[in-house]
Image (cartoon, grey):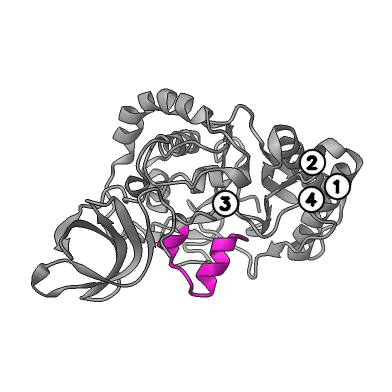
Amino acid sequence: MKIVNFDNDVCALTDKGLVRSHNEDSNRVEETRNGSLFVVCDGMGGHVGGATASRIGVDSVCEYVMNSECALPSQFLENALQYANKKIFEKACSDPGLKGMGTTGCVALVREDTVWYAHVGDSRIYYYNAKRQTLYRLSKDHSLVQSMVDRGEISEFQAEHHPDKNKILRSLGIKNTVVPEPCEKPLKPADGDILLICSDGLSGMMEEKDMLEVLVSTKDLNEAGKILVDLAKVGGGTDNITVQLVRFSNTGRSDADFLPKNAGVSVHSGKNHTGKKSKRVWPWIVIVLSAMMVGVGVALLMTNKTKQQEPVVQPMVQVDDTPAYLKVIPQGVNPIKYMWNGAACEFYATKKLSNDKCEGVSVNVDEQSYSIGTFEKLPNNKGYRPIQVERFKKNGEKDE
């Protein structure tokens, strides 16, 4: 049974973005004797090192899958990523100029009517369920902020704006061994469902509700891929952007069987993690703001750094002289204005926790400082009182 049509239902795109002069991402789609293979790697370690690591990562995974026997698919993909790790590490040890290079790795293998997958790092695997019109994460980032979320130290919203957002805990090639994370349960997709694999140059530059909106509204996968890349550029384009889309057909199933890593973003509920209703805004955003990309790109070129040194990715397109407090204001959220201890404040609610509590961002307009965390609504609609927050100064420095 063949559930992937390579001619019409597969899209693979990569773009260097608006800031970097080189593309350190690599990706490939292959038909192999073990199944249909999809690989995305996001390199780290400078222009030469990052590009070399990701290229070796993709080549090695493909080599292993093409030339080895697949008995247990989950273990098979683990072995493929470990083989890639070995090849990258050996190359780095043999060439001093490549010391410290590494890469993330996402791999998916479609065998008959089942999708097996595994990953290392913070490149992501998403799954769009057409029946529910919901986008789910199938992978969980191997990153510092994700570990903080798992421990309950910060919220998902805070993780998106955390200064250590780009620090990953696992990668291919940095050490002589690595522990990939395979799927606990393979995906059995239904007709019309879509697998989305991407580097963080896509997932870090746009909200998941906008990814979902594109997949729901755009039937042509190549066009959907192009729109996703354009939206990542509109969101800042500070990293290389890679996206693979795979649509399934002839599955013989009316609904899917899978194990998601999150609750998903749904069209039917009209909600996303900010608690606001999704609006179909991406088409005009791409048209209106695409002209801004060139100017933003020129400004950001002056601050181009390696992956670990990049500035925090924010939900707004900003240049470097923009006050830090403006960079954390969520797009599309209307402020609630009020006075707190004699200062003019604006509150942006991002997630409702109860009738009187919610997560959000509070900005002291006079001092241009801000707080992110949990707030309690004051009586008579007089504003919000901080309960558990992190406070930041005008320049974005944490206020201890």
For the residue marked with disc 4, what is the amino acid? Gly
For the residue marked with disc 2, what is the amino acid? Ile
> In the structure shown, which secondary structural element does the residue marked by tag 4 occupy?
loop
Residue 224: which disc? Answer: none
> In the structure shown, which secondary structural element does the residue marked by tag 2 occupy?
helix
Q: State which tag comes first along the sequence, 2 or 4.
A: 2
Residue lying at 69% horizontally and 64% vertically, measured from the top left: 182
Image location (x, y in percent) of residue 194: 51, 50
Query: According to the image, label 2 marks what residue?
Result: 56
For the residue marked with disc 3, what is the amino acid? Asn
Query: According to the image, label 4 marks what residue?
Result: 173
**Mark-to-mark CA distance, 4 and 1:** 7 Å
**Left or right for 97, reference 400:** right
**Left or right for 310, reference 24:** left
- CB within 8 Å, label 2 to label 1: yes
Closer mark to the observer between disc 3 and disc 1: 3
Residue 166: which disc? Answer: 3
* Residue 188 in view here: no
Image location (x, y in percent) of residue 124: 57, 53
Q: State which tag comes first along the sequence, 3 or 4.
A: 3
Magenta stretch bounds: 141-159
Residue 87: which disc? Answer: 1
Closer mark to the observer between disc 3 and disc 2: 3
Q: State which tag comes first along the sequence, 2 or 1.
A: 2
Crowdedness of circle 3 by 10 Å Cα count: few (<14), some, many (20+)? many
